[in-house]
Amino acid sequence: MPDKVLPGPVEGPDGIREAVCIHTKKIYDSCRDKDCIEDLRFYPKKQYVDVINRALSVKSGTAQLLYVYVDVEPVSFNRGFYSVDMRFFYSVTLQAYLSSPAPVTIEGLCVFDKRAILFGSEGSAKIFSSEARTGEPDLQLMRKSNLPVAVVEAVEPLVLDARLVDQCRGRDRDCELCEVPSFVSSCFGGELSSGGEDRRIYVTLGQFSIVRLERDSQLLIPVYDYCMPEKECSCGVTGCEDPCGVFRSIHFPVGEFFPPNTVTATTPDSYESARCCFCGK
């Protein structure tokens, strides 16, 4: 068994100069998901309720992920594991078709709840730290519990489908709008409708996400050398380079003048191509 490496200079042919102890967040567990979220209740802005009641059909549009609320709780029956509860808030834009050929753009809120069970290890130590704040006292910060930190990464969702349903036949999967954070509601620039419409809209979204649990840890890592930037600083195009010189460096767009001889119709196999198909971008 090799000797334990201690912080300090390291001699050897591998180019490692020294071993240093750093404080960082260590990822204990993570998972990824590709969720097809069916029949999400669409909460429109009140100004679009009458449009929905008179609409003949609706078509998919675009969706934007506004916020994810994340809560971490220990799993009582399995030590070291934690449940990560997530609530996704989406701003969804759809196209509603009435009697006229031109569609009416409607906007509203969709909410999706998700849970993951991940390993986050155990820790009973209380953590105290001090942070300097400009213009404020240098207060000491205390964490009473040593729970791992959950991090959720997600890309913009894909709107896969949207359909109109009479209220009497709609499934009751409502989210109480009183539980929506105020800063999320303010993103719509108007009051959202939680009921009263003769018809409801249910949306199907596709969501890619990564969830991980992190803890503060002290790790011993090898250091090869100081990280010195190789690129020189530039002040951008405006005011530093000749505009004509910048234009001359751009390649001629041959593809814009000569269309391809064939067009291959395939099912989108990547996130970028799927957004082009479903979102019309």
Image: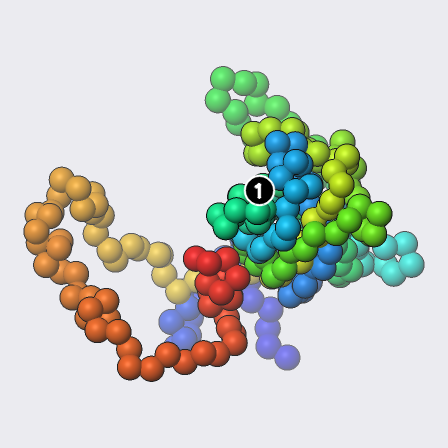
Residue 54: x %, y % from top left: 66, 42
Three-letter amino acid code at disc 1?
A: Ile
The residue sitting at 37% across, 79% down in the picture is 263
Q: Which residue is rendered at x = 67% and y = 36% of the image? A: 49
Q: Secondary structure at mark 1?
A: strand
- x, y (%) of residue 82? 79, 55
Task: Count the numbered circles shown.
Answer: 1
Asked if residue 197 shows in the view, the reply is yes
User: Badge 1: few (under 14), some or many (20 or more) residues near its Cα, within 10 Å?
Assistant: some
Image side of residue 168 versus residue 116, left or right: right
Estimate the x, y position of residue 125 in percent, counting from the top left.
76, 44
Q: Which residue is mark 1?
A: 106
**Residue 113, above or below 3:** above
Residue 177: image x %, image y %? 74, 35
> Is residue 177 rendered to the left or right of residue 22?
right
Q: Quadrant of residue 117?
A: bottom right
Quadrant of image for the N terminus: bottom right
The quarter in which the C terminus is drawn is bottom left
Of all residues, the one furthest to the right in this rendering is 77
Of 149 and 26, nearer the camera is 149
Nearest the viewer among 20 and 25 is 25
